[in-house]
Structures are given as C-alpha cells and as structure tokens.
Image (tube, rainbow, N blue to C red):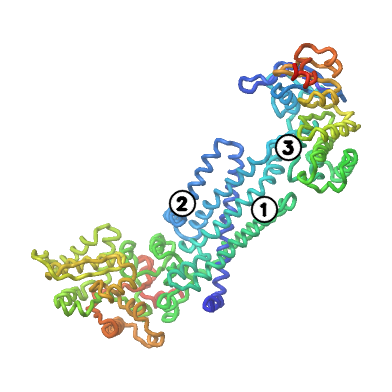
Amino acid sequence: MNDFVAFVGTHADQLLRQTLTHIGLTFVSLLLALLIGVPLGILIARHARLASVTLGVAGVLQTIPSVALLGFLIPVLGIGIGPALVALFLYALLPIIRNTYVGITEVSPSVTDAARGLGMTDNQILLKVELPLALPVLFAGIRTATVINVGVATLAAYVAAGGLGEFIFGGIALSNTSMILAGAIPAALLAVGFDAGLAWLQHRSGRRLRVGAVVFALLLPMLSGFALLPAGHDRLVAGFAHEFYGRADGYPGLQKTYGLQLTPKLIDQNLMYEAIHRGQVDLISGYSTDGRIKAFDLLVLADDRHAFPPYDAAPIVRQAALDRYPALGTTLNKLAGRLSDSVMTTLNYQVDYQKQSPEAVARQFLQRTGLYKTPSPGERTQTIVMGSKVFTEQYILAEIYRQLIEGQTQLRMVTKTGLGGTQICFDALRTGAIDFYPEYTGTGLLVILQPPADTLRTMSMQSDSVYAFVDAQFRVSYNIQWLKPLGFSNSYALMMRRQQAQALGIRSIPDLVRYLQR
Amino acid sequence: MINIQHLSKQFGGFKAVDDLSLSVDAGETLVLLGTSGCGKTTTLRMLNRLVEPDGGTIHIDGIDVREQPAPELRRRIGYVIQDGGLFPHYTVAEAIATVPRLLNWTPDIIDQRTRELLDKLQLPVGSLNRYPSELSGGQRQRVGLARALAVRPPVVLMDEPFGALDPFTRRHVRRELFGLTELSETTVVLVTHDVSEAIELADRIALMDKGRLVQIGTPDELLQRPANDFVRDFLDDKPHRLRG
C-alpha cells in the first residue's frame, strides 16, 4: 500500500498524462462511433432488410479479440494512435448502431403515426420524436461502448498510443504491483465514473434528457481533445518496450551512464521491430542477438561505457554431472567463443525468418565449424539431461549441444526444452532434474543471485568481471559451474536502421547523445 | 367541405376501400361506422394522405388533397387517435404547441391559445408541465383533442378517439368534448365500431362493409329506414341479435 502511494506520488505527472490520453482515446473513438453508428442505426431502422446484415457484421467485429484486432490493424495502419482508435471505434460501433436501431424501432407506431398525422415531415419526426424517444436506449448503448472502450484503451499501450495501459503493461513486465495498480485503479475508476454519469443521464426524462444529450454532445469533442495532447518531440523517435523503459538496467541506466534524454513511445516489444522497420520509430530497445536485426538490417549502437550489463551466454552445469562424466565439460567447452553476436543473430534469423528447423540450423553450424560428427552406433547407457527456456535462441543452443554431445561422446542426451522462464529452469538445475542449460551472465547476476544494490553499484559491468563473479558465486552457493562463454552476449541494445544511422554518422550511444543534443 | 369521389384502395389483393363516394358538409359530424376491416380507418387516413388512394379523388374545401404537400395538408387538418397518440416526451404544454410551432406561431400567441384550450377542455393549469404518463386516460384524451384543435383547423379527423377509455369515462368525456363550441363549428369525421357512440355523436352515419358504403344518412334514417338487413342487424340491439 505504501509502495503504491509512493509510486503514484513520484509518477503523478505521468499518471495525469496517461489518464488524459486514456480519456481522449475513449471519447475520440466514441465520437467516431456515434458519427457513423447513429446514422447507420437510423438507416437500418428505416430499411429492415439492411438491419440483420449490418448488425451481424458489427457483431462479428465485436467478437474479434482485442489483441488480435490490433494485430490485424498494425500491418495496415502501423503503430501509434491510428490502430488504437480504429480498434476502439470498431468495438464501440455495435452498441451504438444496435441501440440507435432498437431505440427507434421501439417508438410506438401510434406515436409516429400521430406525428405524421399532425403534419411533421420525416426529418421532423426523426429529430423531434424518434431520436428524443430513443435517447434513453441510445445512452444505454453509449454507456456500454464507453465502458468497453475504457477497458480496451489499455491495449493502446501495446501500439505506442499511450494511456493507462503503459503502467499496466510496464508493471506486468517488471512484476511491479504498484505500477500495475497505478494504471488499473484509475482505469477502473474511469469506467465506473463514466458508467455512473451516463446512467444518471440515461434516467433523466423529457426536456432534461434532451438538454443532457446536447451537453454531452458538446462535451464529447472536448474530452476527445485529450487524445491530441502534444507529445514531446525528439530529433529521433524512440520506441521502447515497457520493461526496458522501467528496468534499472534499461533506460534509467542509459540516462545515468550517458545522460540520454528522450521522450520515448512505449510499445510492445515484438511490435517494436516492425515499427522501426516501417520507419515509424527511429530507435528501439531490443536484444543484441535478435534475428530481426539481420532481417530488418538494423544497427546495434555500441555501448562503450557498458550501461547495459553483459548477458554472455554460457552453459551452466551441475558440478556432480561434470565429475561423473568428464567428457561433458570438455565437449561443451569446444564451443567456447565460437558463437559471436553476429553468428547467433544469423542463427536466430534462419529459424525465425527463414523458417528452418533448429535442428537443421544447428547441424549446419556445427558442420561449418568442423565440430559435427555423425554419432557412432553403440549402446549409450549414461544419460545427460539438458534443459532450455522457451525462446528460439535457447532451442537452437539446445540442438547444438545435443548434436555436439551425441557426435563427440557416448553419452545419451535427453532434452527438456520448454522449461518456461529463468526461475523454472534454474530450479530444475538446482534440484537435479536437469544437468545443464544455457544461461546468461546478466540473468545469473540480476535474476538469480540478486546481490544487494550496494554490491551492484561498486561492481564493474565488464563481461569478464561479471562472468567471474557469477561463476564464483554459483560454485559456492549452488555447486554449479559456469563453463566457458559461447562468445555472444544477448543483452539489451539500442538499435537503429542501418541506413539512417550511417547517414547520421551514428555508430555508438555517445554518437546518439551528441546527435540529439545538437 | 369534404367531397370524396370513387375512392378505392387495395392492400395486396385485398380491396380495403372500393369505389367509395360521399361528401361531408361544413360543421357536420360524420361517423364512419363498421366492423374491423370494413375500410373505415383506411378511408379516414386517405383524407389526410396517411394512406395514398389507388383511385378516385378527395377534395377538401374545393382543393384536391393531392395537389399540396402532405405535411402542409395535415397541419390544417386536426388528427386525434386512440388514447390521444401523445408523445411520451412532450409535456401537455409542448403537446398543445406541436402544430402551432410547425406553423411558426409566436410563443405569445401559442401561450394564449394553450390557456384558452386548457380552460375550454377543463384541464388544470398545473397539468401544463406534466407528461402523458402522469395524466389519467380521460385527461390524455382531452390533451389529444386540444393538440388537434390548437390551430383551429376547419376539419378534424378522429380514429376511435375514445377506444382506450373504460365505458363510463368514455361516455363522460364524449359528452363533454362534443359539447364544446370549438367542435360544433368544426367539420368532424370520426371512425368507430361502437353503434351507440355513432348514434350519439353523428349528424350523419356512413355505414361501411367490405370497403363499400352500405348506407349514409342521419342516425334516425338508418334506424327507421335501413337500406337492407345488414344495416338493420348492425344497428339493432346487440343482446337481441345474440339471442337471434
């Protein structure tokens, strides 16, 4: 609770901006839905044949899961406010069309007949009789649409459109409950507040309702205006993942080490690469061995001052297994230094983008480096169990290890891929369920060992020293060894499109800082 | 005042009104009487063009109704339907002002006319800001009539105007309303299936069956000299008929 209050206190500016953007997104899309949905509802109330088709289509749109809808829209509209508004608009459409239609068709025929008999024109009947009488039902639809939109607008943070989802997704990525609540509570309050306000309006009668509707109609564009709050502009547009933006060794580390000052857009980390590829952002946070670096021809900016902790990959092995099977350690160490950043990036690219199997990619790699041997026949009695986490790079590494060991030794390999995240994998190793798996020094340090902040501050973040530290600590605490590093580091990295970076003469983070300050 | 010649209307293959001719004099109250589906309501609705005829002509005050835009025609013809046909979202004052506003009367004149009608129809002044749901059935009917009479139309059409009221209230409201001088100067065409209502209110009754006019005349004429058995049976006491 205190954490939460403290978080809100220190992030009040951000919270206010996100809340206003959230309100803006909700009401711009509602306004659009009203501008399209009300005339459409009127139209289908007049032409019954169109009603079932229109309501059917709007109903189908409603059933598309919101994340999937954003997924469909991004290739067309890119990232930013566009896809978010279109998605919200589509969700708001059904309740508006349906309730306009129902509201109008439920007006008693004797009332419209009387109106016509008194000499009202069709337009007068619509404006003076049907729409006013449909207002309570229409407002019920507006309520539904608003509540849906407040909820769905949290997803806008996926596509760099801002809103309270920034805190929610950031909080989830960082396992920071206060941050999640700082986004979720205001979002819930907005939903409840708007619902109550509109419910109150809906239950006014006669003239008051009509006055209320006019006031609401005037208020709507004003609330919508919040979506257009000016965002800061940098000479280069940065799009960062929520986790990177919040983690001490991510953006805050960059600020501290290089004095980098940006107002980044926050975006889902998988969409980030797509966004830089399409030129919607110029600078992203990513991982230094991601296959998309090669696929999209990105340039990783050199981190001269080691703001990002090194994430050197190396197999970590139970001492017991090394003692029992001496061949294991020597065989694994044959890979030492064989996988540079660019080699690993290429392997990831081959699997992720060229859709080759990890098995084939691993074999080609081993053949290229001369380490491949066809496994010799013969009974294998001694078993080694290997684990891996669930992402491409780990699958490839697991395949390389399996083929290497089966080719070079008489050990039998059992692979347990798909052990989820670090915690699960490491627990399996510690308890002896597996004998080894590939780990990263930075993860060993920050996730597993978690030394006190004081220790971290004084530590050198050079690759060698971090490696030495984790190896020593793991031997003492867990009786686990870090074998020789493979040669690449899958660490955080800032990256730009190669072409743009070259045109601007930016090769490193200090270059970037200089460019931004110019 | 109203002259109908060879009027006919079909819905699908069904002849709702079949070659109907009749005329209504100024200030007269003509009751269109008949069973459900005899074409009386369709006839009434063709007078203000809520239904467009397939054949025949209608002249009101010498002018063919089809020679003018329907909304303009209707604003000069009062229209009263069952239960008043009031708009649920209009107060009594707004209801009475409906047609005057369509004709762009000034607020002063509308206000003056509204009070005049309230007085004549014995509606309490306090009811001006009430909504239909807050009124009794009889009050709603009076407001419906006030709305129809607001611009002093020379012709008023009424479609089962007392149909939603219980028998006692119906008699009461009927006597009261038709005692009004406002109405006695107006040409009224009223549709009903209620024989006693027709006999009580009509200057003349037009009895219809299957879209055709069977007999038209004063209530006495129809009672004394029915044109055929249908007329006699229709006007006869219902209990007696049931016994027969």
Instruction: Give the structural element (helix, strand or loop) at label 2.
Output: loop
Subunit under mark 1: A
* Residue B36, picture quadrant: top right
Q: Outermost residue, front direction?
A: B243
**Sequence-wise, which precedes: disc 1 or disc 2?**
2
**Distance Cα–Cα, label 1 vs label 3:** 24 Å
Residue A508 at what x, y percent from top left? 36, 75
Subunit under mark 2: A
Q: Is residue A414 shown left or right of residue A143?
A: left
Task: Identify which residue is drawn at 58% across, 56% down.
Answer: A146
Instruction: Give the structural element (helix, strand or loop) at label 1.
Output: helix
The residue lying toward the viewer, choosing from A503 and B174, is B174
> What amino acid is at disc 2?
Ile
The residue pinned by badge 1 equals A202
> What amino acid is at disc 1?
Gln
The residue pinned by badge 2 equals A64
Task: Identify which residue is drawn at 34% across, 85% down.
Answer: A460
The residue pinned by badge 3 equals A115
> What is the crowding at mark 1: few (fewer than 14 residues within 10 Å), some, or many (at least 20)?
many
Subunit under mark 3: A
